[in-house]
Image (tube, rainbow, N blue to C red):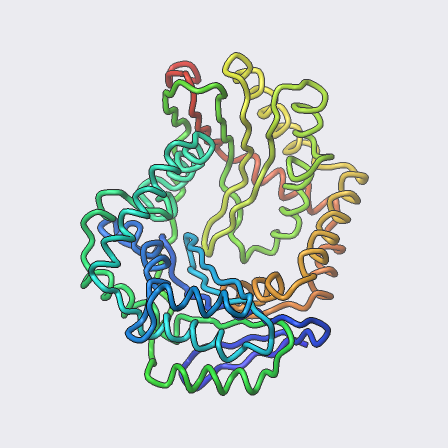
Amino acid sequence: MITTTTLNSGIRLVTETMPEVASLCVGVWVGTGSRDETPEQSGISHFLEHLLFKGTPERTAREIAEEVDAVGGDMNAYTTKEYTTFYVRALAEHVELGLDILCDILCRPALRPEEVDAERQVILEEVLMHRDEPADVVQEHFANAMFPAHPLGREVLGEPEVIRNVTVPAIRSFFDEHYLPGNMVIAAAGDLDHERLAAGIQARFAARHGGRPPVRQAPGDQTTALVVESRETEQAQLVLGVRAPDRHSADRFALAVLNHTLGGGLSSRLFQEIREARGLAYSIGSDRSAYDDAGTLAVSVGTSPEHAHEVLELLHVELDRLGAEGITSRELEVAKGHLRADMLLSLEDSGSRMSRIGASLLLFGSVLTTEELLARIAAVTADQVRTVAAQVLAGPRTLAVVGPFAESDFS
C-alpha cells in the first residue's frame, strides 16, 4: 500500500508497505541538482552530497559509517541534474537509527573546514577519473551541445576551478537555501508503519521549515550540430541524438517503446544490425533523458576509428527509417513485454521501491500505482509510436565524438 502525507514542516512523505520483507529503505530527495547552480557554483550540489556524510556536530564521518555498518546497513547518495538523493537501507528493526542519521546530516551538517578541504581533493580526483574515460567525456560534450549555454548542458561533477576555490560560507549558503522541507520528499519502503514514520520525521525536522523548489528557466531551441574532441584512443566514442519531449509529456510511454526498439535491448535494431550482423561494435545502445522542461533521445557507440564513419552512416539510416516507418507490430510486442517485466523485476526489493515512489512524488507530484503504470505501457499502440518517431527524429541531430579525428572529418 502506498500512502502520501504532507507533514507540518512542509516535507512530503510517501511510503510503500512491504510486510513480507525484513528490510526498510528510507531516502531523502532534495529537489535541487546541478541545473540549479550558477556557473560560479558549478559542482556545489555534488560537493554537498559528499560533505553531508562527513559528519554533524555530534557525529563524525567515522562514527556514522560505524553505526550503519554495525547493523549491516547500506548508506549512499547521488546527485543528478535536477535532484540529490540520500538513503539508508537496513533491517526494519533499525528504523530509528536510519532516521536519526539521515535527519541529522540533512538538518545539521558540520561542514568543518578541514573536512571540506579533504573532500575537495577527493572530488577533484573523481573529476580527473571521469575525464580519463572517453565514454564519459563524449556524453559530457553531447549534453553541452544539446543545451548550449544552459545549466542542463553542464556536467554534474562541476568545474575543477570552482571546486578548488568554493568557500565553506558559500557551501553553507547553498545548503541553507535549498535543503529545506519545502524542497524535500522523504520516501520509504519496507516493513514500516506510516504514521510512526511520519511522527519520527516531523519531530526530527521540527527546527527546519520553509523552502520551495527552485525556479528554473527552460532551455531554448538552439543546439550545436557537431562537437569533436581530438584524442588518441583505441576506440572512437560517438553519441548521436535529438531533442525529445520532457518527462511530463503524454508521449513518454510511446517514447519508451521507441527507445527500446531503437537501442534499448538485445533485440533492438542497432544492437542486431551493428553488433550482431556486422560486428562493428561491442557496446551500442540508446537512451532517453527526460527533464522537467526538455529531453533527449541519443545513441551511444564505441567503435574502432576506421569504422566510425560506416557506423555513423548506419545510425543515420536507422533513425531515418524509424522516423519514416515507425515500428512493426512484433517490435511493439517485444518492447512492451520488456518494459513490463523490467518494471516488475525492479520492484523486488525495498530500495528499488523507495526509489520509484520517491522519484515519482518529487518529479511528477504524484505516484502512479504499479497497475496504472502497466496499463499505460499496455495501451501504447504502433500508431502512437510512429507519430512520436516522426516528430522527434525529424529534429536537428547533434553528434559528439571523442577519438583520433578533427572536426573537419565529420563536417
Specify the quadrant that holds the C terminus.
top left
Q: Quadrant of residue 179?
A: bottom left
Given the current orientation, which residue lies at the most extreme top position? 306
Residue at 37%, 85% in the rendered image = 206
Q: Position of residue 396 (x, y in %)?
A: 48, 33
Query: Toward the viewer: 191 or 304?
Result: 191
Query: Toward the viewer: 105 or 317?
Result: 105
Q: How many marks?
A: 0
Image height of 387 relative to 375, above or below: above
Q: Position of residue 410 (x, y in %)?
A: 44, 17
Query: Toward the viewer: 361 or 169?
Result: 169
Q: Position of residue 178 (x, y in %)?
A: 32, 67
Q: Position of residue 300 (x, y in %)?
A: 54, 32
Query: Toward the viewer: 132 or 373?
Result: 132
Image height of 205 relative to 56, above or below: below
From the viewer's perspective, is 405 left or right of 276? Answer: left
Image height of 40 relative to 48, above or below: above
Residue at 33%, 84% in the rendered image = 207
Residue at 73%, 66% in the rendered image = 371
Specify the quadrant that holds the N terminus.
bottom right
Image height of 258 relative to 168, above or below: above
Q: Quadrant of residue 302?
A: top right
From the viewer's perspective, is 14 left or right of 330? Answer: left
Residue at 70%, 65% in the rendered image = 370
